[in-house]
Image (cartoon, helix red, strand yellow):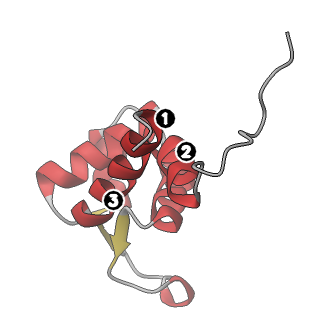
Amino acid sequence: MPRITQPHDAAWSADVEAAVATFGNRSRNEILRFLTANGPATRGDIVAAVSAGEPSVAKHLTALEDAGVVIVDVEPGRRHGRSPRYSANAARIKELLDAHLGYLLEK
């Protein structure tokens, strides 16, 4: 049986792709859950609270920021030597979940 690598479906939008990449990963869900419950936090705070190491958390935070579900208080080019604080973007999380649900339920 051939493996599906990219859906050939017009309903598979960029938001559906972002939802699958974001919410299909347990570590990313754990990070989002921590940020939602605890408000803005540094990367060190997140590493201490979740079951992933610093390199993994750093990688996931970058992906979450790229998807728009995490907001950072310091812009990317100005982070050297600073401790940016990360927050969950509840509106974007809901937007991606709605897109994914709409795709699954063909809405």
Q: Nearer the viewer, mark 3 or mark 2?
A: 3
The residue lying at 33 percent from left, 50 percent from top is 98
The residue lying at 32 percent from left, 50 percent from top is 46
Res 107 → quadrant: top left
Q: Residues within 10 Å of mark 3 (few under 14, many from 20)?
A: some
Q: Nearer the viewer, mark 2 or mark 1?
A: 2
**For the view shown, which residue lies furthest in the front direction?**
107
**Which amino acid lies under the numbered mark 1 shown in the image of this protein?**
Asn
**For the view shown, which residue lies furthest in the top direction?**
1
**Which amino acid lies under the numbered mark 2 shown in the image of this protein?**
Ala
Do the CB atoms of the residues marked 2 and 1 lie less than 8 Å apart?
A: yes
Is 86 placed left or right of 82 in the picture? left
Q: Which residue is mark 2?
A: 21
**Which amino acid lies under the numbered mark 3 shown in the image of this protein?**
Glu
In depth, the one of 28 and 3 nearer the eye is 3
Is 13 placed left or right of 75 in the picture? right
Q: Which residue is mark 3?
A: 95
Give residue 15's position: percent from left, percent from top: 50, 57
Q: Is residue 39 above or below residue 98?
A: below
Q: Residues within 10 Å of mark 1 (few under 14, many from 20)?
A: few
Image quadrant occupied by the N terminus: top right
Answer whether residue 31 is visible to the viewer in this image.
yes
- Compare marks 1 and 3 and give the one earlier in the sequence: 1
Q: Is residue 37 above or below residue 29?
A: below
Answer whether residue 52 is visible to the viewer in this image.
no
Is 85 placed left or right of 4 in the picture? left
Q: Which residue is mark 1?
A: 25
Q: Mark 2 to mark 1: distance in Å?
A: 7 Å
- Compare marks 3 and 2 and give the one earlier in the sequence: 2
Q: Mark 3 to mark 2: distance in Å?
A: 14 Å
In depth, the one of 2 and 36 nearer the eye is 2
Q: Nearer the viewer, mark 1 or mark 3?
A: 3
